[in-house]
Image (spheres, grey):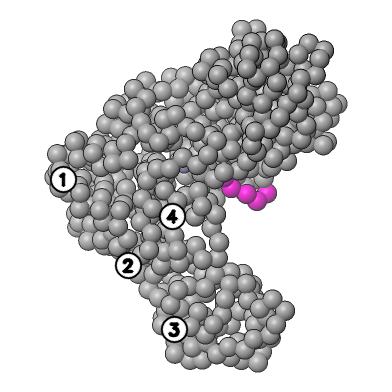
Amino acid sequence: MPSYRVTPTNPAAHLFTVELTVDQPDPDGQVLSLPAWIPGSYLVREFSKNIVTLHAWCGDAAVAVTKRDKHTWCVAPCAGPLRVVYTVYAWDLSVRMAHLDQTHGYFNGTSMFLRVHGQDAGPQHVELVAPSDPLCEGWRVATTLPEAPGTARYGFGAYVAPDYDALIDHPVELGTWSLLTFEACGVPHEVAFTGVVFDLDEARLIDDLTRICTHQIQMFGEPAPMDRYLFQVMVVGSGYGGLEHRASTSLICKRDDLPRLGDDKVSDGYRQFLGLCSHEYFHTWNVKRIKPAAFTPYDLSTENYTVLLWAFEGITSYYDDLILLRTGCIDVDSWLELVGRTLTRVRRGSGRLKQSLSDSSWDAWTKFYRQDENATNAIVSYYAKGSLAALGLDLTLRKRTDGRVSLDDVMRALWVQHGQPGVGVPERGIQAVAEAVSGLDLQDYFDLAVRGTEDIPLESMLAEVGVILRTRAAKDSADKGGTPGKGDLDRRGDVGAVFSGARIKAVRDGGAAQAAGLSAGDVVVAIDGIKAGKAEAQLGRKAPGSTARVHVFRRDELLVRDVTLGAPAQTTVWLELADDHADARAAWLQAAD
Ligand code: ZN
């Protein structure tokens, strides 16, 4: 069986060394490969580019290695044991690759462990070696990779995964992280913080996470599918991200987002952090175990296509914040603000009228994960619109079954029929399970919300549960929506572009900037003969229908364009409670108004 010895050999140079031993290599020549992508993040990232050196030995004799393609190595036949030693450059501070310096080490197995073809179905051994750099003294190991006998919890030493798929699904954090622990439904949970944390209100965080995790385990039904769970949290000054795994999640959050002692308000940042924890935890069921058939098993050498990412990310995005409400971490107004922001994000982009959720899922590899300046006009987020499709599905099920069936029931059925037995969800499987559970014909809803490009009629759906959807003009492109807004926003002319200071980041299809011939990348230098500063604010002072003479640099050439400002688009959404339908709303939200 393959055995990997991982050493943070040179933290200052960001280098790990891996020594892979294969006792019985393929007699025809051993093939080794590194994944091209990491499950949960649908972009071919070509992790093999970070392998700096690679050599193979049989005993003391060097063995020839040739490359078959960018991530596949063929080792010449040898009797064994085969020893392959390679170095991995680790300087990517994200949740997707690997990072090593004298303050900590982190890696995903997809960046570190060459797959031994023909031997990936059996146990995979790992030995984690402590760094010898004196600055790394006192490091410990935070991972859900199972310890081998003789290795203490959090210790360097031997670990073992049942197969290669498991080996690459337990990221490893090395360092002097601080630890919080709690239990949810009898399952031990840990939170390991890397990075400086000030005055953390540990009791509050544990209380909130306990409620969120307990709720989710009970929603899908005890027992939980994992026997322990780890939140690996990288705390930074500025940054955000998360990636789900079968018994852990890797998160990056802002220091200021964590709750501080003496402050009992739910800041926007803390709400976002709890939403992220809730989101990744929900994936423990929805995508780590309830999976598209297209991912069963994954082919990590190339893109894996499915129309279902909207269900795995969108339904998860619907529940992440809803569960904060149901568990009392946030109140109804706070939740309505978040839904209003999601509606705003979706409605501001005309890409929603061109790309369906199915197509957005299928093309995630080249479109959602490779967004450019035209994304707003060309694509729709399967996270944001996916969560609205889940909201609409939940309300449709509740209404048409008189409250007998909800999306919660569909998720439990998906768990029982697909997650627990490990049976992949076919491409039309979400609709099929929702129809079987409810007894409804949902073809029209899925054609509209998932396979179509028209807006989901959420105004009328929400009205029937006592929530009023209102729209208004945006204050500026930094206005995320979700609130009523202040002042007379309709007096502001719409330029139809998104700015970053004086630079145009994106131009909206059909807007004033596009009609005048302005483009993404243009730098505004003057408006009506006056030096431009915050170009968007300067243009926003002009009334709809008025014209501004705009000087821009495109590359190094000066252009002059007259921009006739448009009527403000009413695409900023906020929600408020109505007086009626309180019972239906309470049954849906399962929270006090
Ligand atoms: Zn997700």
The structure residue drawn at horizontal position 48% and vertical position 72%, both measured from the top left corner, is: 508
Q: Amino acid at mark 1?
A: Asp
Q: Is residue 240 magenta?
A: yes
The residue sitting at 42% across, 64% down in the picture is 351
Q: Which mark is residue 441?
A: 1
Labels 2, 1: front one: 1
Residue 238 visible in the current orientation: yes
Displayed quadrant of residue 524: bottom right
Disc 2 from disc 3: Cα separation: 21 Å
User: Is residue 336 a member of the stretch shown in magenta?
Assistant: no
Q: Kindly report the secondary structure that dominates the magenta region of the rendered protein.
A: loop
Q: Are marks 3 and 1 in contact (CB under 8 Å)?
A: no
Q: Nearer the viewer, residue 223 or 439?
A: 439
Instruction: State yes or no: discs 2 and 3 in contact (Cβ < 8 Å).
Output: no
The residue to which callout 4 is attached is 381
The disc placed on residue 566 is 3
Residue at 20 percent of width and 56 percent of height: 464
- 177 to 549, vertically: above or below: above
Whole-percent x and y of residue 432? 23, 39
The crowding category of the residue bearing disc 3, from other C-alpha atoms within 10 Å (few below 14, some 14 to 19, many at least 20), is many
> What kind of residue is marked 4?
Ser
Q: Which residue is mark 2?
A: 470
Quadrant placement of the N terminus: top right
In primary-sequence order, the first of circles 3 and 4 is 4
Asked if marks 2 and 1 touch (Cβ < 8 Å), the reply is no
Mark earlier in primary sequence (2, 3): 2
Q: What is the CA distance from the residue labelled 3 to the residue labelled 4?
A: 26 Å
Q: Which residues are magenta?
A: 237-241
| Tag 3 secondary structure | loop
Front residue (pair 225, 41): 41
